[in-house]
Amino acid sequence: MNKDIESILVNESELDALTERLAARIDEDYRDTGRPLVMVCILKGSVMFYVDLIKKIRRPVEMEFMKVSSYGAGTASSGCINLHLDLKRTDYPSLDVILVEDIVDSGRTLSMLTALFRERKVHSIATCTMLDKPSRREVDFAPDYAGLSIPDKFVVGYGLDYNEYYRDLPYVGILKPEVYTNH
Ligand code: PRP
């Protein structure tokens, strides 16, 4: 285990089961729609989860990527989000879209992105997150698909970072407090 990790919160086999479970639910819900299913990876944190998830979905999916940052403490509207990388499509009304995140914290990012895709008049919009921290919520938001609800601990690994480190760990671990309190 990495020396900066206090304990493993979700190990590799648990992550495998979690992605399998979510993929099966998505397959069930989007079977025979006759529409493209677009899975949107919200960079960077969701990369590992996203790749493992879409490999387990049996129906065809399209891959898209977004990079966003939110700002301000305003209400959850698409007006408070910076889009650093966006989809370039003209066929929104024909699409079922699922936004894929590593973690939901305040809820602002997915709340604002959901509003954005509603404005784009997609056929449907849903959200899928590996981890959920409901105790941190600042806006009224609930993901449609959530792998695991976790306590308010500083978690890293499997895409999640602290100062860009630890994203490459194959598990989700709790970071030792001395790592982030000494900086
Ligand atoms: C994290 C995470 C979500 C967002 C969740 O991204 O990946 O996008 O924060 O927080 P919220 O619910 O409070 O909006 P971050 O900005 O750390 O970027 P990264 O994915 O590139 O690490």
Image (cartoon, rainbow, N blue to C red):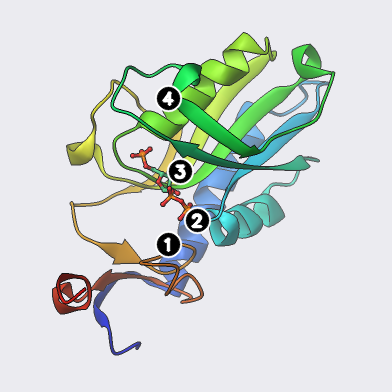
Instruction: Count how many numbered circles sit on residues in the image.
Output: 4
C-alpha gap between disc 2 and disc 1:
5 Å
Classify mark 4: helix, strand or loop: helix
Q: Residue 94: in sight, yes or no? A: yes
- Give the labeled residue for mark 3: 129
Q: Are marks 2 and 1 in contact (CB under 8 Å)?
A: yes
- Give the labeled residue for mark 1: 160
- Give the labeled residue for mark 2: 45
Classify mark 2: helix, strand or loop: loop
C-alpha gap between disc 3 and disc 2:
11 Å
Mark 4 crowdedness (10 Å alpha carbons): few <14, some 14-19, many ≥20: many
Residue 109 image position (x, y, % from top left): 43, 33
For the residues carrying marks 3 and 2, which lies nearer the camera in this image?
2
Q: Amino acid at mark 2?
A: Gly
What label does residue 111 carry, if any?
4
Q: Amino acid at mark 3?
A: Thr
Q: Amino acid at mark 4?
A: Ser
C-alpha gap between disc 3 and disc 4:
13 Å
Counting residues from the start of the chain, the first of labels 2 and 1 encountered is 2
Classify mark 1: helix, strand or loop: loop
Q: Based on the displayed image, in which of its 4 quarters is residue 31 positioned? A: top right
Mark 2 crowdedness (10 Å alpha carbons): few <14, some 14-19, many ≥20: many
Residue at (15, 78) in percent of width and height: 178
Mark 2: C-beta under 8 Å from nearest atom of ligand 1: yes
Q: Amino acid at mark 1?
A: Leu
